[in-house]
Amino acid sequence: MTNYIGTATSRVDGRDKVTGVARYAAEFGAPDLVHASIVTSPIAKGHIKRIDRARAMDVEGVIAVLTHQDRPAMADSDKAYKDDVAPEEGSPFRPLYDDRIQFSGQPVALVLAEDSETASYAASLIDITYDEEPHVTDFARARDKAVALDAPAKPRGDAASAFATSDVRHHADYFVPIEHHNPMELFASTAIWNDGKLTVYDKTQGVQNVHGYLCRVFECDPDDIRVVSPFVGGAFGSGLRPAYQAALAVLAARAVHRSVRLVLTRQQMYALGYRPAMIQRIQLGATADGALNAIAHDAVTSTSRYEDFHRNETTWSSLLYKSETASYQHKLAHLDLATSCDMRAPSAATGVYALEAAMDELAVALGMDPVELRLTCYSDRDQRTGLPFSSKNLRECYRRGAEAFGWDRRSGAPRSMREGRELIGWGMATGVWEALQMPITVRIALTSNGHAEVSCATADIGTGTYTIMTQVAADVLGLPIEAISIKLGDSTLPQSPVEGGSWMAASVSNGIVTTGKAIRDDLLKLAQHIPGSPFKGLSNDEVMLVDGAITSRANRRDAIAIADVVRAASIDRIERKEQTTFAKDKAHAHNTHSAIFAEVRVDEDIGVIRVARIVSAVAAGRILNPKTARSQIMGGMVWGIGMALHEETLIDHRLGRIMNANIAEYHVPVNADVHDIDVIFVDEQDDFVNPMRIKGLGEIGIVGVPAAIANAVYHATGVRVRDLPITLDKLTRTA
């Protein structure tokens, strides 16, 4: 009997990745391939006055230089450029559309040549004159002109009055800078030309999203373009929307009627999207025994001039803690930058950072243990709606995490724990994310040799989608894991949403179950026509697929091999395609939760911070694969270290230009920054979230980690740094 769900299964695509068999967007080729290189704007705002391409065109091997003046036709309406996850308000960016410059790093010309070196060299020879206009890229300057959005949630009671009369009050501003995703794989598109039709190999988190976008932009039939992305070398949200290189690769292919490859440089990727800068003001009022009676959470976040991208940083407050009064406000500050986008638990990583740092400060003011405060304010209901959670085993997360960490040995006073010259700090925080699922369609083809092919247009962005799809299909179809093959990342496959938001595991797994049941029903009908069949008169629920056979639930000896059933019907395959939708559960709120405990060590003399260990206890419903799940949470925790201590995009506001657009000067955690990490999965039964009881893990790993580290730094040093990243200069300056 197969039993792969819930077992620690190695990645089925692992060998292909480590041997180089797996191919990424820039690794697909074609005869007579053209290479493209982008010229980008050095100014942040203005217009193009003149483009001189003469020197570039004189270079041997250059085929063409495309600009807004001579490109192939593109759509004129905003609607054509709005993809599935585009902001509702605003006008999406249109690459090479006109002479207007909206941000530094904007593509303004495209050089096509016989090889990449020639294209890159020729691009450096193009002379462009600009009519520059005043720009604003400084978030601090734009904050006062921020525009208020509709209230993210209804206020409860009079939070201002409740705060003013609270026994203990805390209020402070918390700053998160612009951060960039920096996935390992560069953004790239290879557009293969075939008599006017194109196959586009693209780095994306949603092939069908890119397909629809390209078809609209170039006003072509859906059959004229196919988008393929079998493997993605990380994205972290940057690949949710179509990146401009996909449109430019198609534009170039249509211009020269040849296959084209376009690979962005690391520097150019900094103009694709980023976590927006933000300031959050938190006000917490509490009674002397720690019960919250007021929460006010206000945020100002940045976006571009041309699109209103935003997420709800503020309403996470009511998901975690009980308070009779609450108020929320969100404003947008428009800057002359590219549009910000989703990045690693968007809104939660940032909103929960501010909330959990504030809760720690409140605990200090109350003289309470941080865990005790959170238990005092614990809520079994979503305070915004009053709905109970479909499951919430957060109390057990606190208990298991604290026990594994040794929290009971913590000395409460700042600067009270040390070892030699190192100050030791212990901090903790809570994490929370949504448990979501999306409509999805899965096709299963079961052949007469007992092999099953499962296909869906979903993506594997490095999280292990190939593996969990294989595990679920093997169990549902009663086949060994070796008999399952997975096809994904192709726009011609059955419908799938973009891969993001932690919803794909739940969505595609339930989709496989739905389609697998249909396959089982078809097998039963065929088996009932076999002479002497033991299944005559049995209903669908009275049989199951196990060990490569259809079997009676009541009598396991009544079994016929699946391959024999198919062959007896004189067919070579059974194929079903089913759409899975999810009924809206209006009686519950659905979330994952975690408790994070962090130890930092701070060199007292020079202020260097080292994260010595982190423990994360996670309650996330049913865990499909503990091995890949652990890796997913660990990866999120490492990004949490980066957010807390390293990551910050720096802009020269005189030029409106990002100055550290590389991974030498944009700091991310490296091996030396990562020490002991422990992940604990807390059992959690959720009978309401979806039939398979899956909640998802993609985002929860990072949420709460920056706050736990920030709180640990305070505990070690007695210095509270509220603007991320926490660096030694801020420690010494604040001290």
Image: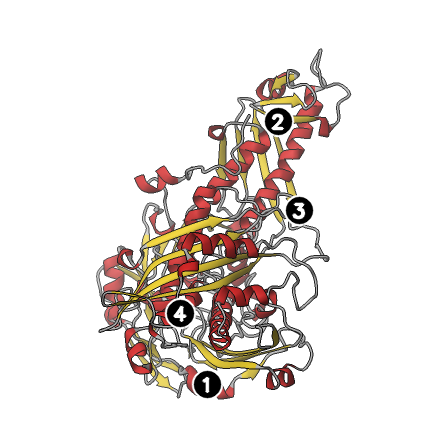
Q: Secondary structure at mark 1?
A: helix
Q: Give the residue displayed 46% in from the left and 47% down from the top.
A: 629
Using the image, tell me which numbered label, if any, was put on residue 545.
Answer: 2
Q: Secondary structure at mark 2?
A: strand
Q: Which residue is mark 3?
A: 687
**Secondary structure of residue under mark 3:** loop
Where residue 297 appears, x then y in whole percent? 56, 77
| Mark 1 burial class by Cα count in 10 Å: few <14, some 14-19, many 20+ | some
Residue 259, can we see it?
no
* Quadrant location of the N terminus in the rendered image: top right
Q: Amino acid at mark 4?
A: Ala
In front here: 286 or 340?
286
Residue 59 disc label: none
Q: Which residue is mark 1?
A: 142
Residue sitting at the far top = 532
| Residue 131, image x, y percentages | 36, 85
* C-alpha span from label 4 to label 3: 36 Å
Q: Earlier in the sequence, mark 4 or mark 3?
A: 3
Query: Where's residue 686, x and y in %?
Result: 63, 48
- In front: mark 4 or mark 1? 4
Residue receiving disc 4:
710
The answer to the question of whether label 2 and label 4 lie on touching residues, with beta carbons closer than 8 A, is no
**Separation of disc 2 and disc 3 at Cα?**
23 Å
Q: Nearer the viewer, mark 3 or mark 1?
A: 3
